[in-house]
Image (cartoon, coloured by chain):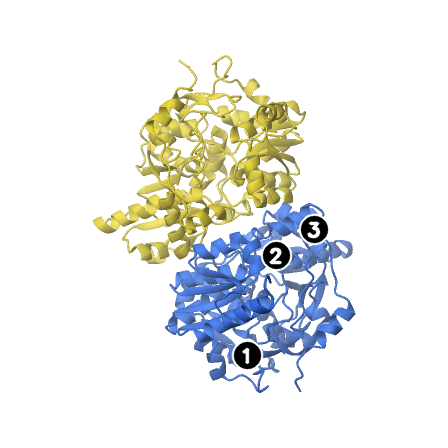
Chain colours: A yellow, B blue
Amino acid sequence: MSQEIPYKIYLNENELPKAWYNVRGDMKEKPAPLLNPATLQPMTAEELGHVFCDELVAQELNNTDCYIPIPEEVRNFYKMYRPSPLVRAYCLEKQLDTPAKIYYKFEGNNTSGSHKLNSAIAQAYYAKKQGLIGVTTETGAGQWGTALSMACSYFDLDCKVFMVKVSYEQKPFRREVMRTYGASVTPSPSETTEIGRKILAEHPGTTGSLGCAISEAVEKATSTPGYRYVLGSVLNQVLLHQSVIGLETKAALDKYGIKPDMIIGCAGGGSNLGGLVSPFIGEMLRGEANYDIVAVEPASCPSLTRGKFAYDFCDTGRVCPLAKMYTLGSGFIPSANHAGGLRYHGMTPILSKLYDDGYMRATSVEQTKVFEAAQQFARVEGILPAPESSHAIRVAIDEALRCKETGEEKTIVFGLTGTGYFDMVAYQKFNDGEMSDFIPTDADLEASFKNLPKVD
Amino acid sequence: MSQEIPYKIYLNENELPKAWYNVRGDMKEKPAPLLNPATLQPMTAEELGHVFCDELVAQELNNTDCYIPIPEEVRNFYKMYRPSPLVRAYCLEKQLDTPAKIYYKFEGNNTSGSHKLNSAIAQAYYAKKQGLIGVTTETGAGQWGTALSMACSYFDLDCKVFMVKVSYEQKPFRREVMRTYGASVTPSPSETTEIGRKILAEHPGTTGSLGCAISEAVEKATSTPGYRYVLGSVLNQVLLHQSVIGLETKAALDKYGIKPDMIIGCAGGGSNLGGLVSPFIGEMLRGEANYDIVAVEPASCPSLTRGKFAYDFCDTGRVCPLAKMYTLGSGFIPSANHAGGLRYHGMTPILSKLYDDGYMRATSVEQTKVFEAAQQFARVEGILPAPESSHAIRVAIDEALRCKETGEEKTIVFGLTGTGYFDMVAYQKFNDGEMSDFIPTDADLEASFKNLPKVD
């Protein structure tokens, strides 16, 4: 049987999903709603509509429909880089000498270099459809900003990206990709917003933070007619769009009669993990199947494994709504030596709820081990993985080695979310033997938890 | 008909070519042989065997067999990233509002970011099969070095890359990719070779040149037991391996009954162009079909359009054999402001001969126009192209616009050799409006031609 499975399973274009899967429709207990930070009441569509596009607000609040059609225009864009391949890691299996069968869903074959494009194009489409002039967003490392720039360029929409100043200066290549796609990229904090000017006055010479960039992007969107704010992770709508990853993975596996035992995804805000696993968790919710679903997070930013399940702010600037999620506290910032991405303090409410309900488990890994796995994978499978994706590789390799001990012929599927072409500074650190690990102490986390908002 | 053609035509893995196509087998007049620079006699297999692997020497000298089987081990590696997609540029066509049908063969979906891997893996395989310890090579921008590092890592072969010092320092990311794949990367000129030490003594502080790096790599290979030298372009063997591009392209077109009118490739040393067009030129040589084959080169390095067809050195260091080719003189170096790649002073002997015999035509384009085309393509087709590849995009767009004027429904195929992730410095120059053009004067070229070796 295994001999018949090609190295890469490509679905045909007519097998591209026609609808996204909304796991909330199958959840008996729904994720807790976003709360207005002023009133502590659930955010209404009207309130959300000041910040987000109308159609995206509807998707954000839709807890009932299991399937939401993918607009034709979005599917046409998807066709330029999707269906993405499900790859059988024959070379890695051989090197590990494992009886396990390893597959990875590779989302890096597009210029944004990651899965982020799946949601960026949908969000840009709805913004265009609403007749907007443009959108604003923030970006740290730049994956999301790049994806959004590409999407906006396709729909001829203005795109204003606030890029954390330190990244703007240290990652000029990411910045230039965005500019090539026509986006305006502003280092944050900037003089172009009130909050930016305030922060600059208070902290002259600051190199910025994601929280500050979010605040600037939201202010710019809400204060500029014809603009809305968009976000690349955490939100329900993002997980909905990313379900295309899991739907394709399932279709490709079904095509060859493969039943996975274990599905592994890296977890930052949860956009990739949620997209990959939600169709499988849907089967579990409906009692049709059972899988071992594993979220992998960095030991330096362990929201699922060491966080609290509580209402918290989505941004460090505390201007956004409150979400009930596994969180390390909105003020938590991973150690400066952390190079492996997945730096978000919380976890998307959908996955937080599913995790709390026992539908998946979580594990954390240290970054030197992650880069070892990345290098090992690159050398045999030929793809230079993003540090984020390499968290999932680490756990897949460890499991395959365990299977070697036990003789189990497990089928392991993991999400390879993207490529590491713009992460060579981190690779260099690893190549030079200068990478170290950092795990927050219990005292660090307790101090951070003290700042959680009081919500009954 | 056109409605039925998918965005991306993917061949199945069992449609991956089983043999490379050797266009020399179909050429009535063969390309002129390499000459020993000391004796001016054709290089013998024995002489070449000091520098290259035995099997590659045999391929280099094989002017008769039309097909040479691809070893199973190489095909297995190919399966990790091949067959590569033939993409219908629907979005670009729509934007140009042209009746022309545009296709591109995309070779960038692998970590090396280009087609170079097709030959790197073959050369590494033959080196391993011969029982060698390792190989040496030089790299400028780093595409070839990256590809070779990946190939050597796969076959567990040592890889010593001499990287032009200025690139080593200005392109640290390329360097780190090679190191991640386990290659040792030495800035050239270096203290590790006799020629390197000599150059450093004569020119302290020099930032190196490709010619010098070649000399160091050849010296290292010939002076270290168990090593041979490998090269990523110009040689007959490289064109042979790259024929997998053209064979797949033809198979994909045939599958949908598409007959191209025009086939366009960028031309530096000729590795991509030769690989893409040779199966089509084979049909022309056998009188089975006719195509408009177009080589596109930079106006700043115009070997085909303004060069001489003569014996010349392959390297600026003048240590390699002489090849009969279109050349600007081995001392020719494009202007320092040239950012678009394709900097080689000559053109592979096979294509030089075919061009001289009228089987293809050539055109040159200026780099600002090339980057305009690159940006336009990126924004609608979603792929950030390498500057090299963008030369072909420029001519494809110009032809499609011409078709718009005339109403011709031409089918245009071009080679998209790679991605531009590591070329963002050039893109930044373009984005900032700081890119300029430079065309060598006739006097420049005449001066360079004066240094051509005297061969009867």
Q: Earlier in the sequence, mark 2 or mark 3?
A: 2
User: Residue B456: horizontal and vertical position, in percent?
Assistant: 67, 87
Q: Quadrant of residue A250?
A: top left
Q: Which kind of residue does numbered mark 3 sit on? A: Glu
Q: Nearer the viewer, residue B29 or B433?
A: B433
Mark number, residue B372: 3
User: Residue A88: horizontal and vertical position, in percent?
Assistant: 38, 52
Q: Are marks 1 and 2 in contact (CB under 8 Å)?
A: no
Q: Which residue is mark 2?
A: B103
Mark number, residue B25: 1
Q: Which kind of residue does numbered mark 1 sit on? A: Gly
- Report in which chain the residue with disc 3 lies: B
Label 3 Cα neighbours within 10 Å, binned few <14 / some 14-19 / many ≥20: some
Q: Nearer the viewer, residue B205 or B187?
A: B205
Q: Secondary structure at mark 2?
A: strand
Whether labels 1 and 3 belong to a single chain: the reply is: yes
Q: Secondary structure at mark 3?
A: helix
Give the CA separation, mark 1 to mark 3: 39 Å
Label 2 Cα neighbours within 10 Å, binned few <14 / some 14-19 / many ≥20: many
User: Residue A144: horizontal and vertical position, in percent?
Assistant: 53, 38
Q: Quadrant of residue A56?
A: top right
Q: Height in image: B288 above or below A318?
A: below
Q: Height in image: B250 above or below A417?
A: below
**Of the two numbered discs 2 and 3 in the rendering, the one whose residue sits closer to the viewer:** 3
Q: Earlier in the sequence, mark 1 or mark 3?
A: 1
Tell whether B1 sits left or right of A44. right
